[in-house]
Image (spheres, grey):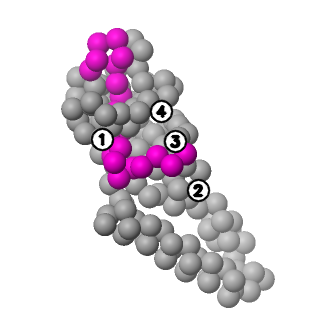
Amino acid sequence: MEQLKKITKVLVFLFISGLTLSCSDSDDMDPVAMNEMMNANTIIFDGSFVSDGHPTSGTVEVIMETNELLFKNFKTDKGPNLDVVLATSLDYTDYITISDLQGIEGNYSYDLPTNTNLTKYKYVVIWCVDFSVSFGHAELKMP
């Protein structure tokens, strides 16, 4: 049911955006506003990192148009063999690995596998493979 609500929300947004663009006269629209609208990304899920085994902070967004995870103001401790994973729950028994962690402080982008079910895999986890411990996680929710 929640998946249906999310899809409906995205479709309504795209429909209204299409009507607005098709009904407007591009000569009358402010070029800066038009550029911002065309470059806008639709955030379909977002969350904030919380610490688990190590201090971890920042935010994560899932961008519909590019099918990617965006880490913003991310920070965690240095560790051996850290991965970004999506998990179904915080017991970390059902998860998929997205990528090696690109860095411990900054803004990063990760491509999501095609057709990833984010209503099932709703936790983004910084996972230490060598010690089987979560450094931190963020729960993905609809904004």
Nearer the observer: mark 3 or 2; the answer is 3
Quadrant for the N terminus, please. Answer: bottom left
Q: CA distance from mark 3 to mark 2?
A: 12 Å
Question: What's the amino acid at mark 2?
Answer: Glu
Instruction: Please report contact status of discs 3 and 4: CB closer than 8 Å, yes or no.
Output: yes
Question: What's the amino acid at mark 4?
Answer: Ile
Q: Position of residue 57 (x, y in %)?
A: 32, 35
Quadrant for the C terminus, please. Answer: bottom left
Comes first in the chain, label 1 or label 2? 2
Residue tagged 1: 88
Q: Nearer the viewer, residue 15 or 48?
A: 15
Residue tagged 4: 98
Q: CA distance from mark 3 to mark 4?
A: 7 Å
Magenta segment range?
Answer: 114-133
Comes first in the chain, label 3 or label 1? 1
Instruction: Please report contact status of discs 3 and 1: CB closer than 8 Å, yes or no.
Output: no
User: Which residue is rendered at x = 23% and y = 23% of the image?
Assistant: 53
Residue tagged 2: 65
Q: Quadrant of residue 136?
A: top left
Nearer the observer: mark 3 or 1; the answer is 1
Residue tagged 3: 112
Q: Position of residue 86 (x, y in %)?
A: 38, 37
User: Which residue is rendered at x = 41% and y = 33% of the image?
Assistant: 96
Q: CA distance from mark 2 to mark 4?
A: 18 Å
Q: Nearer the viewer, residue 91 or 56?
A: 91
Q: Residues within 10 Å of mark 1 (few under 14, many from 20)?
A: some
Question: What's the amino acid at mark 1?
Answer: Thr
Q: Quadrant of residue 34?
A: bottom right
